[in-house]
Image (cartoon, grey):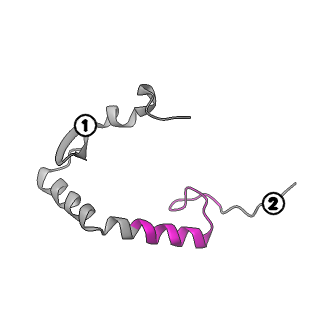
Amino acid sequence: MVDFNMAEKRPGNSQGLSPTALRAKRARDKAMAMTTDRKNKKAENQRIGQKSDSDLHHASGTVRRTSIAYNRATHTRDEVKS
């Protein structure tokens, strides 16, 4: 039996990343979330008001509300490649 020393999958580390890789990923994710573009989108979402039954999509300078069911069912429209 081969032991690859894979990190254990648990809350906050569902991808099973090593501690070093997890720290790097969290730093990258935070840097992306703090960009001016993301801050503007977050502020716009707060002005519009998020609803529990839909997601907001920012595209081409407009915001479109999409049902969660439609948004999460991309595999049924062949948008996700296996």
Residue 32: percent from the left, percent from the top? 36, 65
**Left or right of residue 50: residue 79:** right
Identify the magenta region: 8-29
What residue type is disc 2 on? Asp
Looking at this view, is 33 or 61 the one in front? 61
**Left or right of residue 18: residue 40:** left
Does the magenta-highlighted stretch encompass residue 16?
yes
Question: Which badge, 1 or 2, is on the more N-terminal residue?
Answer: 2
Tag 1's secondary structure?
strand
Which residue is at 19% across, 54% downward? 45
Q: In which quarter of the image is residue 43?
A: bottom left
**Left or right of residue 18: residue 50:** left
> Quick one: which residue is furthest to the front in this view?
60
Look at mark 2 in the image and give the residue it sits on. Answer: 3
Categorize mark 1 by other alpha carbons within 10 Å: few (<14), some (14-19), many (20+).
Answer: some
Looking at this view, is 55 or 77 the one in front? 77
Residue 27: percent from the left, percent from the top? 45, 72
Look at mark 1 in the image and give the residue it sits on. Answer: 66
What residue type is disc 1 on? Thr
Categorize mark 2 by other alpha carbons within 10 Å: few (<14), some (14-19), many (20+).
Answer: few
Q: How many labels does the image show?
A: 2
Real-space CA distance between mark 1 and mark 2, rounded to the nearest whole angstrom: 44 Å
Q: Decide: marks 1, 2 in contact (CB < 8 A)?
A: no
Which residue is at 55% across, 56% downward? 14
Image height of 3 relative to 74, above or below: below
**Left or right of residue 22: residue 7:** right
